[in-house]
Amino acid sequence: MSAVRHVSGTRALGSTLSAAILLALAGTATAQDGTAQAGEARALDRVQVTGSRIKRTDVEAALPVTVIQKADIEAQGISSAEQLMQYLNIAGNGSDNLAANAGIAPPDLRGNNGVSGANLRGQGADATLVLLNGRRVATHGLRGQAVDLNSIPFAAIDRVEVLRDGASAVYGTDAIGGVINFITRTDYSGMQVNAFVDLPEAGGGNIYSTNILLGAGDLDADRWNVFATVGLKKNDILRGNSRDFSNTFQPDRGLSPDTRGTPFATLFNFAGGMTPTTLTAPGGGVVNGVNTLNLPGAAGCEAGGDMMGPYDFRLWATTATNVASRFGCAWDYPAAAVMQQPQESVQFLGRATFKISDNHQAYVEAMGSEVDVNRIFEPNQISSSGVATAAFNPTTWYPLNETTRATYDSIYNAMAAYFGAEQLNYGAPIAYRWRCMACGPREVQTNTKAYRVMFGLDGTVGNWDYTMGLSRAASESTSRLGTGYHYTAGLQQALGSGLLNPFLMPGQEQSPAAMAALEAASAAGVVLYGGRSIVTGFDAAASTSIGRLGGGDMQVAFGVDVRREEFEFNGDRRAAAERPAIFNAPFDDANALPSVSRNVKAVFTELYMPVLDSLEFTIAARYDEYDGFGGTANPKVAFKWQPFDALAFRGAYSTGFKAPEFSKLFSGITATPYTGLDLADPGRCPGGVVDDTRPECVQIRPDIITGGKPDLAPEESRQKSLGVVIAPVDWFNMSLDWWEIERIDTIRTGPDVDTLRNNYDLFIDNWIRNAAGDVIGLDRRFVNSGGTLMSGVEVDVNFRGQLAGGNWRLHLNGSYLDNYQDKLLEFLPYSDNRVGEYIRYFSLPLRWKHTLGFSWAKEDWSHSITQIYRHGYKDEVPTSVAAGHYIPSDWNPDVDRYITYNYSVSYTGIDKMKLTLGVKNLLDRDPPFTAHKNDWASGAAWEPRIADPRGRAYSLLVQYDFW
């Protein structure tokens, strides 16, 4: 949108505080960004800042907005929106980047393949509104929950505005955590080309990008402007075992891989197998999970490969006497995942603007992107037990035949030498657990195409400013299986025949026949699932002055917002009659959705009231009506009080909401039999515990019902903030903002069986009965229940001056999290404060985060050095420590703080050229050690929600303007 020139009623910027606030508003902006210097009295363009519908000059202190300029993004060597979020202190530490979601995902995060999200104040990517030039883009096609930042045309970004406050009263749903608005150029004339490389010193994880920008026309002289930009970006893979710190074989510190699925297979006891269920070690005691490499006098687990080692049963045993697995070996499967997923993207943005008259202009804007991401994690585990029992039974265990005899006999002889031949069943197949390295790493390849087309018109009519826009945006994603997945029948045949040998040592290879069998069984290329998210919308707003108060013009804005949201999700796309099973492929047929849609209609208003020169209020309200659950109204009240030039106070109160996603409303219903033996009908048997002596307390085995629930209500929130901005002199200013967000009616999976049983009167409707009154099902579908309560303080401090003929600036931006509490059910009290504690999957609540930067610029040179600080936290407690029977010798419950430094230097002394050289992680700091359990999170001994695993890296940006 074009800037509206100074008109009667706006105030010139003439105080030290106002000039300083422009710097504070800019957040990380440097002194080269054209910001007004103190004492300059000049009429400013009236602009619309993220979070307000009214254009005015004096919004600087009223809203807690952080603005990051393109020059500062480039100086930090940031090449993507995902990287930018990792630098923002107000961003939550969630699994929102391609490193943190690279490995095993819980079921409710299935479908995050290739997605990077914006997560402000730890509220989640689905509760942070992402805008492009002030308007919505489509959520990612796989789940329809959050915008994929990889689809944003980052090379075209001019600045990023981050509203650190709730904004449902202005924008509607999803703005609970705040708003991040990516703002691109609005016009350009010329030709510019840039190229960027980011190369880690230790190798792997290289990043490359290039961009071309072309434009023509001058809005004032020609009354039109057209420009377009195309960017290419590539992230090379960074493998999980390519850094020394990525190593889970650190048992003395409380970390060891919890698997016995090893490249040299581990034997398990089963009836009908070579090793019986009662295999007894010399000296007594039944053992299970024996690896012959780890028997007394054998070569040792490490002989099986550089990622093998002993299975540390002490860490994973729940009792001190559980030593049955003491002869097992383990494999470092967390380090076999990737640290940086390989990614390639093409991004496009084009815009044509036409100046219809001095007061009106029209534009058309088109954005498009295609992103390919390859999610890679460890090879499949072939197991004789557990979830694979149905697929891998005695007919697939390692047989004795002419192909296998030599290997079979070597395993038998090693077992007989220690356990005695009398305990073994020679000739019976060997049950085992094996990591099929020959199968290759598992890959899920996701292609996402996104676009948005926007037609807009804005300008002035009399004393009214207006803007309107019609847009359509879509995101379509398809995930396909890559290597590592095989049709179950073909894999069974290769195993049961003995072609595949699970007992190979390093340097030995599978036979050509075995590899041919695997190739024939490969499921590479099969579509795993796909989805599409579409949003079509029209919005219009108008604002004007409606009189004067003691502090100036009172202004009001009105608007409408109408949109249609559509979503579809496909599970297995193969015909139902042609779906041979694929081993361990994570299909999601239960949540397949045909095309579903809803209409949203909203009206909003905003009133700005400068009651006095020193006191102003802003009141906003919005009413949204959704097909399906009706309407929701959300107000916001904000104030700014400036008792004198050097001091201003600001604050706000608002409510917010987040509409239920389609996947939670309409995903498929699944009925799974309850497998426990302890459940009775609490309607007949108080307490619901089985008691065979009482007829009313007989055991029941109802179905557990999970899936979507069409009558879900929106989540709700209440937000408060209070801040102060201080600028006593022209070379110093600071802002301090306290905030609190309480979310209620959060949408979660329904209460577990114990909660339903222990609170039967509250959940009586969740017990599904037949006509005879017998319990046949327990409803655990999604439900509105529970909530979170978070609060914190954000600080921004700026010093500036002159040194050695140049301008310097010292900038501190920090975020202090004071409180994080949650509750699973509405009637329960909040938990204790969990700040500084390890939390799986979601945002890790760090107490303190900051960036501290110093910059100096003189003539053609500018330098900057930045410290990035992330506070430590309490680690996840290993099983043995939690049980209290074993404490590792070097166990430390505290994860260390993480501090890195970045340096950059820019030079503009060559005509039409700009060069920026940067060094990330200047001191080559490794991520701090963490012992979190890797079955439930990415990262082998490090935390990808906080740290960058690439180490010291060198970046170079070359930009050239042809004309």
Image: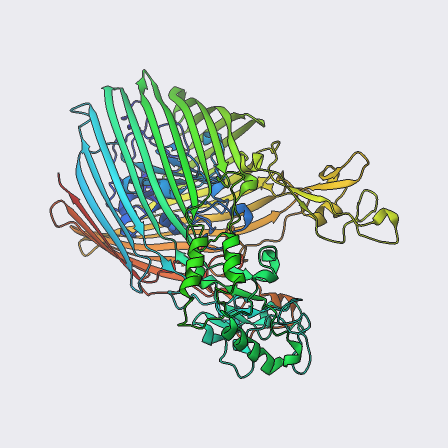
Across and down, in percent, residue 467 comes to 35, 23
Q: How is the image coloured?
A: rainbow
Residue 557 vertical placement versus 165 (above, below): above
User: Which residue is situated farthest in the top direction here?
Assistant: 462
Residue 596 in the figure: left or right of residue 513? right
Q: Residue 136's image quarter?
A: top left
The C terminus: image quadrant? top left
Residue 398 vertical placement versus 564 (above, below): below
User: What's the residue at 29%, 23% (across, down)?
Assistant: 7
Across and down, in percent, residue 251 comes to 52, 72
User: Which residue is situated farthest in the left direction here?
Assistant: 911
Residue 962 in the figure: left or right of residue 811? left
Residue 453 in the figure: left or right of residue 291? left
* Count of picture labels: 0
Residue sitting nearer the eye, 326 or 474: 326
Residue 117 in view? no
Residue sitting nearer the eye, 442 or 546: 442
Across and down, in percent, residue 216 comes to 17, 31
Residue 822 in view? yes
Across and down, in percent, residue 96 comes to 45, 48
Residue 812 vertical placement versus 872 (above, below): above
The N terminus: image quadrant? top left
User: What's the residue at 43%, 22% (across, down)?
Assistant: 559
User: What's the residue at 66%, 73% (across, down)?
Assistant: 320
Residue sitting nearer the eye, 414 or 867: 414
User: What's the residue at 38%, 43% (across, down)?
Assistant: 447
Residue 689 in the figure: left or right of residue 365? right
